[in-house]
Image (spheres, rainbow, N blue to C red):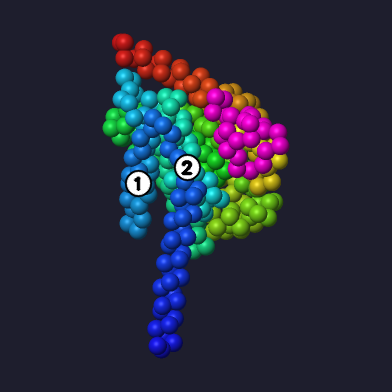
Amino acid sequence: MSDWIKSAHVVGWLGIVTVVTYVIYTEATRVELPKGVVAYTDVVYKRAPWRQQKLDVYVPDARQNQPLPAIVAIHGGSWRGGTKNSYGREVSRLVNYGYVVISVDYILSTRNHPGWPENLDDVKDAVRWVRRHASEYGIDSRRVVAYGSSAGGHLATLLGTHAQGSDPETEVQAVVDLYGPSDLADLVRNPRALEALEMLFGKKPNEAPELYRAASPLSHVSSTTVPMLLIHGEDDDSVPVAHSTRLGEQLAAAGVPSRVIVLKGAGHSFKLDGEGLNLVPRIVGFLDQTLAPVASARAEVNRK
């Protein structure tokens, strides 16, 4: 057998092993779908000349009498990794508390193609898709929440500031941000984050400091910013807890209802109900309270 054929066989077997390993890993790390939840997966919400973006929709398996508020879940991964799949399954537990969960993918940064600002445009388009398809999935289009972790939390908070007043279809009514960065000009001091930020923008901080500031939620807080729940680990060494506490202070100064929960001893990327802590009741309590006035206003309009 020639060396070329031997090499081809080796490459072929390596490819098979890689695929099998990936499948095994995916199944081993797969988050189970909660009981009472139905998933509609890989729905295309955006088509572009050279790419398309997909989302997953998680709804109750029993038909509801009234449309439910929607949670647009945005995964983390330093703006260059992660997927909607396992993240959506984790957040889908909120379906059993009276929500429809939509987990979205968005463009990821590469060394040849920065992700900003297309990633923000993608999640805005996802919110727009949710509103346009609300009736198909039993969604109340007037109650949409942006929910994200880490880089996803950054994009979620931008949805709560950037979109307000510019395009009603991309507006959200509340934000849940888990350990997301709020000040990218400050985050560059962390060597672990610097590479991801340079990939995000395609520029070093000293080349475009105004870009780093403009992409920071802290730069956009105003009286029109929506209510936010910020949850952060006290010992986070990837995104310092000060990113949430400072954002909370600025929200309070602007008169925006907000809550900041600092988890003692927690680092970056924690589970909602891990290590004896269950954050679900706090998240649901915040959202129920925040969205109740919107629901009341809707009922009043319907009565008229």
Q: Give the SS element for disc 2.
A: loop
Q: Indicate whether 71 appears above or below 29.
A: above
Considering only vertical position in the picture, is 18 above or below 60?
below
Tell me the crowding category of disc 2: few under 14, some 14 to 19, or many 20 or more residues within 10 angstroms, Cα based. some
100 displayed left or right of 252: left
| Residue at 35% across, 46% down | 42
Q: Which residues are magenta?
A: 260-282
Instruction: Between residue 67 and residue 165, name the one nearer to us.
Output: 67
Q: Residue 40 location, x and y as percent?
A: 33, 40
The mark nearer the N terminus, 2 or 1, is 2
Image x and y of residue 119, in percent: 46, 48
Give the amino acid type for the residue marked by disc 1 in the picture.
Asp
Q: Residue furthest left?
A: 136
Foreground residue among 52 and 219: 52
Q: CA distance from mark 2 to mark 1?
A: 17 Å
Give the residue number, with chain letter if any, for mark 1.
Answer: 42
Which element type, helix, strand or loop, lies under badge 1? strand
In this view, the residue farthest toward the top is 304
Picture disc at residue 31: 2
| Mark 1, other Cα within 10 Å: few <14 / some 14–19 / many ≥20 | some
- Amino acid marked by disc 2: Val
In terms of image quadrants, where is residue 299? top left
